[in-house]
Image: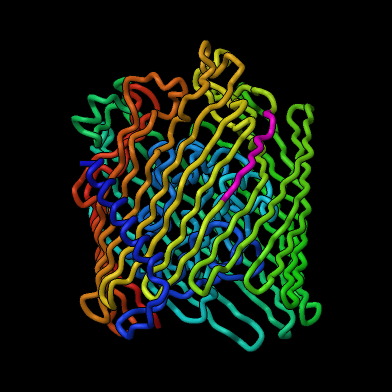
Amino acid sequence: MQRFFLLLVLISCILITNTALADTTEEKDANKIFLEPVKVKAAKIETTDTKATYASEVYNYEDIAKSGATTIFDFLSQNTSLTVQPSSGNQLSQVIDMRGFGQAQGYRSLVITVDGRRLNNIDLSPQNLVSVPIGNIERIEITKGSGSVIYGDSAMAGTIQIYTRNATQTNITGSAGNYGISTTSINTGTSLDKFEISAFADTYQQGGFSDKDLSGKRNEGDRYFYKAKVKYKPTEDKNFFIEIENAGSEMRYQSAMTLETFKENPASHIGAFGATNFTNALTRSRRINLGGTLKLGEHVETTLSYFNEDRESIVFNPIRYKTDIFNGNIILNKGPLKFITGFERWTGRRELNTTGGFGNGTAKKDNIGVYGQAYYDFDATTISLGARQEWVGYTFANSPESYNLQAFDIGINKSINKKLSVFSNFNYAFQTANTDSLFNSIGQFNGFLKPAKSSTLNIGLNHNTQSNKLKLTVFGSKLKNEIFFNPLHPGGAFGVNTTIDKSTKYGVEIQNKHIFNKSISAVINYAYTRAIIDEELSVDLCYVDHCKGNDIPGVSAHNVTFGLHYNPTQNSRLILTQKYRSQQFAHNDFRNIFTQKQKAYYTTDLAFNYNIKNVQITAKVDNLFERSHGIWVSDNNITPFNYTRNWRLGANIAF
């Protein structure tokens, strides 16, 4: 069944692609909608996706609203080429992987920003996307295999930029569903002469999908997010803002179980060792973000911003994290030349103070980066060139460590005609260890890790017609010292953070949108990815065979998302989504010898939207056929998730 489905989607993708490439002389048809190029500004310089020198996926507010998704994780999982799944089963803390860096820790090789502000944490927690309500998103840009010049540390797989909306009206959104799921949000704002004032509040509650344990509780949880923003624009050439956020979540989630228990009842509260199968996680954070933009003439503008976060995380021990980010840039946009230069300082502190515990004290990390990137448009050809210098320093227990690192990117885009353009870029990137990576799984200091480095080549094309939009990219990456958690290290009771000496990643990515008529359209995202260990000379990862030639675990070769959109009337839309990820090796199986593999993931989702003046009504069913999914860490070590059929009814009211 899985192979048949995959074959069917690939055949459809090939047919649509062939139709697009063959369609070079068609005239505009009144029954079709022309798919225009869309604006991108991942490099902080605006261009169109068809002229960009890098591979990208772009989704605007309309795409997000029409998708039927109720959370940002729903949208990314069901509509993009990204791999999204809960972190250790925690639905409120999900991890994102792109280009084969692994579902366990691939999020660490990806930089995510919101309105230019970096979301990557100094600890091992995934980027906190639960604090980005979907109703407040204006656009999402996914940049693949590029971005290391502008965003620096960790941008090896690529970057995700999220841009939020400036509210000048009021929107109230709410939904309710089975298993005690409910959401509420309000977004409001107003303009007062030279001021714009906006506020946003969002809450989520989950009653629990699992069976009750002996205390009568399930895997229940809730989160909240509050934000207030004031923007001051004294003149057309100046604007300043201050933004305050307060966010938190508390989740009780299922831990590991045996394969027998998973097959019999993935909702069981019985763990792999017979104990109650739940883990509690709590986070609280307070953030302040301020900055401004000043135009220094007709062609030059400068931006400065400062961000501070104080966050507490409690899973097994309470740990406090403090982050400060200060950055600025100058942008020149004059005729065919566009140039940006800037700096960034990102400092973080990990504070753990428990009686008699390992890893007590404060671990510090300090990143200082300067960069410059230029674009020149020769009408039909665009070239880009950029470089970054970054200094990274650590301190723990009076032991300092520092690194001097570089990144660079060179790219070209050539327009063959009005519909077809080709591009290529070469990107050199790096990733340094987070503060939590300095400690093993029982809290002992395991030493500093060498930075990971990657060299990536991308070659692709963009093809737009009246009714079809195609993006195709072929990529290959060579890595040194790829950072991983090694669960089998003899020096750690339950493993340590370490590196793989040499590894390779390569693949093909296809994104295609086809409009059949005003009522029916289809979207296909397909990624074929291989991640292989080339060399591992130490004995701590695979002992005798050194893993040479083995697949890196947690990476699916085939990742497919298919969406069919049908508009029965002008005011309604029905969306059918099918997501598939092929079987893979369990997360700890670097030797590729475990008897149990990660089960293939495939789910079918259905959404319906109906608009009545200023009201949008949404009905949604996830996992329509109630397939059970889990995260295989090792044999009989499975964390279940998304094993129920979930429905939700909601409404969005605009005033």
Residue 395 vs residue 27, the one in the foreground: 27
Residue 74 vs residue 525, the one in the foreground: 525
Q: Is 453 in the magenta?
A: yes
Q: Main secondary structure of the magenta part?
A: strand
Q: Residue at x 27, y 80 (%)?
A: 571
Q: Is residue 507 left or right of residue 179?
A: right
Q: Is residue 625 left or right of residue 68?
A: left
- Give the x, y percent position of residue 275: 32, 23
- Outermost residue, top direction? 544
Q: Is residue 487 left or right of residue 586?
A: right
- Give the x, y percent position of residue 569: 22, 80
- Give the x, y percent position of residue 183: 35, 61
Q: Specify the segment rendered in magenta.
A: 449-458
Q: Is residue 390 left or right of residue 498?
A: right
Q: Is 422 in the magenta?
A: no
Q: Quadrant of the N terminus?
A: top left
Residue 288 image-quadrant placement: bottom right
